[in-house]
């Protein structure tokens, strides 16, 4: 049976969002996400947040039926609905496909799509960039421990390895842990010397890590008696899993060790403000091919043949971005050859063209 209070809370939240947005003269957005956790409630609400152009709130839900119900409630009332496309959650009635349920029941509001776990990983990288902004190398060369090598831990590990960090990953299932690290090391760029390394027992080398990410569902995986082994200026970040008990936090604070909880709000707000502008831009893009005498002009984004000219507008070109080499790249032209192309094509089109 559904919790009627939750339905009332949802309706009140939508009403509140619309009222505040009207007063502030802002657009509205609503996030619909899912999680692999299974809870007794149908959903839980996220806070109302404000960006430069939007007010937004949302729900994390656990069933396809609830996704359909919510989409019907908000369609046409909010400007944009953001849908988590990751298939993370399973319920007693089977896998939850939020994306499909929302698309089938949304006709008026704009639909935008994102992946919540990727958003978390991007927020983690943004946090590190800011935290180490005065460090010339930023996070390159730093030793990083990731406790919990699931979806988020894996994606975060790959990003950090690609940036030159020495990454150690921990997971209870050692077979999967080994495969995760092998996968990262296989797909990372060949020029990246840093590697991902599986580690079963990290307690004896805690003093080696500059950064520790807590991405496990288990509490207090760092033993109480090992706290003193932590590096003095270690950076500890909980990605939102609640890995530390109150007792553990008090012990860490007593040792002047801060624990940061990853804040995805800034990254989320950037997504809201930029998504519609960017989507409008790319949705208005056209891909055209236009032949004038012996020259073929194509739009940026089309794989051209050798000699095809990529321009801002194939029908009325003003800018030349490059000449195709037939292999997915541009011909490397010196200044003299560029001038020759500009002159020939300008005479042909009777318009002055310049290389960008």
Image (cartoon, rainbow, N blue to C red):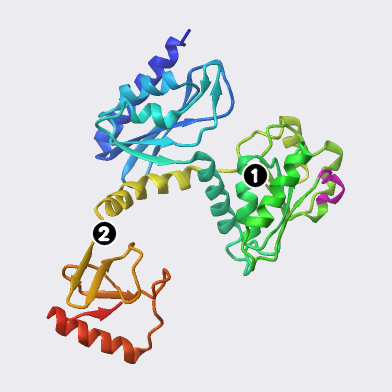
- Residue 169 at x, y percent in the picture: 73, 47
| Crowd rating for badge 1 (residues with CA inside 10 Å; few <14, some 14–19, many 20+) | many
Whether residue 169 can be seen here: yes
- Farthest left residue in view: 350
Q: State the mark number for residue 287.
A: 2
Which quadrant of the figure has residue 320? bottom left
Provide the secondary structure element on which disc 2 rests: loop
Q: Secondary structure at mark 1?
A: helix
The answer to whether 215 appears left or right of 294 in the picture is right
Span colored in magenta: 200-206
Q: Is 51 or 355 nearer to us in this picture? A: 355
On residue 107, the disc is none
Where does residue 102 sit, x and y in percent of width and height? 37, 28
Residue 173 part of the magenta-drawn span: no
**Residue displayed at 41% across by 35% down:** 83
Q: Which residue is depicted at the point 84% across and 48% down?
A: 229
Classify the position of the C terminus by image quarter: bottom left
User: Above or below — where is 166 with respect to 344?
Assistant: above
Q: Which disc, if any, is residue 153? A: 1
């Amino acid at each position: 049976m559904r919790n009627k209070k939750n339905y009332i809370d949802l309706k009140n939240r939508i009403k509140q969002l619309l009222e505040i947005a009207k007063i502030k003269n802002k657009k509205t957005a609503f996030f619909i996400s899912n999680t692999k956790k299974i809870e007794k409630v149908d959903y839980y609400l996220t806070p109302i947040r404000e960006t430069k152009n939007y007010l937004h709130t949302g729900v994390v839900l656990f069933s396809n039926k609830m996704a359909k119900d919510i989409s019907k409630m908000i369609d046409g009332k909010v400007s944009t609905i953001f849908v988590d496309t990751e298939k993370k959650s399973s319920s007693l009635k089977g896998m939850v496909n939020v994306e499909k349920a929302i698309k089938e029941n949304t006709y008026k509001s704009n639909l935008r799509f994102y992946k919540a776990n990727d958003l978390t990983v991007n927020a983690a990288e943004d946090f590190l960039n800011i935290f180490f902004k005065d460090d010339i190398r930023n996070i390159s060369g730093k030793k990083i421990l990731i406790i919990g090598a699931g979806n988020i831990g894996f994606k975060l590990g790959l990003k950090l390895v690609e940036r030159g960090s020495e990454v150690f990953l921990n997971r209870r299932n050692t077979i999967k842990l080994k495969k995760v690290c092998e996968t990262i090391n296989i797909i990372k760029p060949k020029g990246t010397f840093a590697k991902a390394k599986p580690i079963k027992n990290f307690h004896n080398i805690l003093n080696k890590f500059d950064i520790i990410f807590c991405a496990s569902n288990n509490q207090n995986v760092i033993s109480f008696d090992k706290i003193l082994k932590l590096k003095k200026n270690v950076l500890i970040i909980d990605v939102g899993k609640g890995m530390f008990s109150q007792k553990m936090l008090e012990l860490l604070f007593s040792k002047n060790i801060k624990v940061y909880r990853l804040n995805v709000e800034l990254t989320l707000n950037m997504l809201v403000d930029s998504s519609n502008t960017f989507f409008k831009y790319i949705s208005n893009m056209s891909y055209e091919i236009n032949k004038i005498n012996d020259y073929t002009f194509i739009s940026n984004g089309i794989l051209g043949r050798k000699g095809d000219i990529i321009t801002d507008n194939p029908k009325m070109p003003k800018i030349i971005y490059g000449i195709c080499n037939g292999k997915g790249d541009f011909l490397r032209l010196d200044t003299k050859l560029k001038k020759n192309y500009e002159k020939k094509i300008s005479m042909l089109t009777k318009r002055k063209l310049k290389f960008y």
